[in-house]
Image (spheres, rainbow, N blue to C red):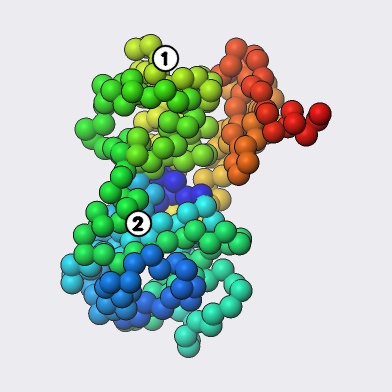
Amino acid sequence: MPELPEVEALKDFLTEHLVGREVVRVLPVAISVLKTYDPPVSAFEGSEVTAVHRHGKFLDIEGDTGLHFVTHLARAGWLQWKDRLPDGPPRPGKGPLALRAALADGAGFDLTEAGTQKRLAVYLVRDVREVPGVARLGPDPLADDFDEARLAALLTRERRQLKGALRDQSLLAGVGNAYSDEILHAAKMSPFKLAASLTPQETRRLYEALRSTLTEAVDRSRGLAAGRLKTEKKSGLRVHGRAGEPCPVCGDIIREVSFSDSSLQYCPTCQTGGKPLADRRMSRLLK
């Protein structure tokens, strides 16, 4: 799933390639992608793009008509830029193409989604706060006013484990499964540690890991073409998606805990005092 660093890089890329240009066609291929119908998505046609914003994991393309074209790429969605779109309208079918946006000069972008779980979402709204997912977002962890005290205030009320708290978009905007693993590894904290139990010293360590991990990921992604962002994300991860590999910090083997629809990865030596965490799903399979 694209998270804050990749969406930030996409925002920068689209700012360079879209601002000042006219959108002449918005062609939905998979009707399921449209989450709003008034105004219709065709109302964005004829808009000149004035700005591109990021809200958590949401991309917001703003037009001079006052409308906002907002998309959430979900788990398997992506934006593919094309300097020259194919001739002729796209054909509905079983392929990954969900929506095509064409510019006046023949360039444009496709929104695609792999797999069978169709969660990619597109909204056309007059006010970005009309998008439910945007309206409920917590603070952006890279915002200038997001400091250690604000993180401490958020965690004090949390009775959940750190892994779940970091992924909650209403608590922090933009952190998902991959970067929560990376942040906790950098902070040397167990994903199962209770958020409200952190000492002031631990909160500082988590805050520094949060800011540095996301900032470094944004810096690695900045300036890359949209098509290279996925590869860059994977290459920069230290523990997420690397179960069975040696930890780049201590050399211990990275372990995994599986859930029904996701998994987390961690280093026992760096994060849990050398103790493996219980993987309940695997335990049940072994019985």
Q: Is residue 32 left or right of residue 283?
A: left
User: Could you say which disc has been placed on residue 135 in the image?
Assistant: none
Q: Is residue 195 left or right of residue 46?
A: right
Q: Amino acid at mark 2?
A: Leu
Judge whether residue 256 can be spotted in this image: no
Q: Quadrant of residue 25?
A: bottom left
Give the answer, above or below, for where 129 lies relative to 150.
Answer: below
Residue at 31 percent across and 39 percent down: it is: 138
Q: Secondary structure at mark 1?
A: helix
**Where residue 190 sits in the image (x, y, percent)?**
53, 21
Distance from Cα at disc 2 to Cα at disc 1: 34 Å
The label nearer to you, 2 versus 1, is 1
Asked if the residues shown at circle 2 and circle 1 are in contact, with their CB atoms under 8 angstroms apart, the answer is: no
Q: Amino acid at mark 1?
A: Ser
**Where residue 46 sits in the image (x, y, percent)?**
25, 80
Residue at 35 percent across and 56 percent down: it is: 59
138 or 13: nearer the viewer: 138
**Where residue 162 sits in the image (x, y, percent)?**
46, 26
For disc 1, the marked residue is: 197
Give the answer, above or below, for where 245 lies relative to 26.
Answer: above
Q: Secondary structure at mark 2?
A: strand
176 or 192: nearer the viewer: 192
Which quarter of the image is occupied by the C terminus? Answer: top right
**Where residue 135 sits in the image (x, y, percent)?**
28, 49
Q: Hey, which residue is sitting farthest bottom in the picture?
A: 88
Judge whether residue 76 can be spotted in this image: yes
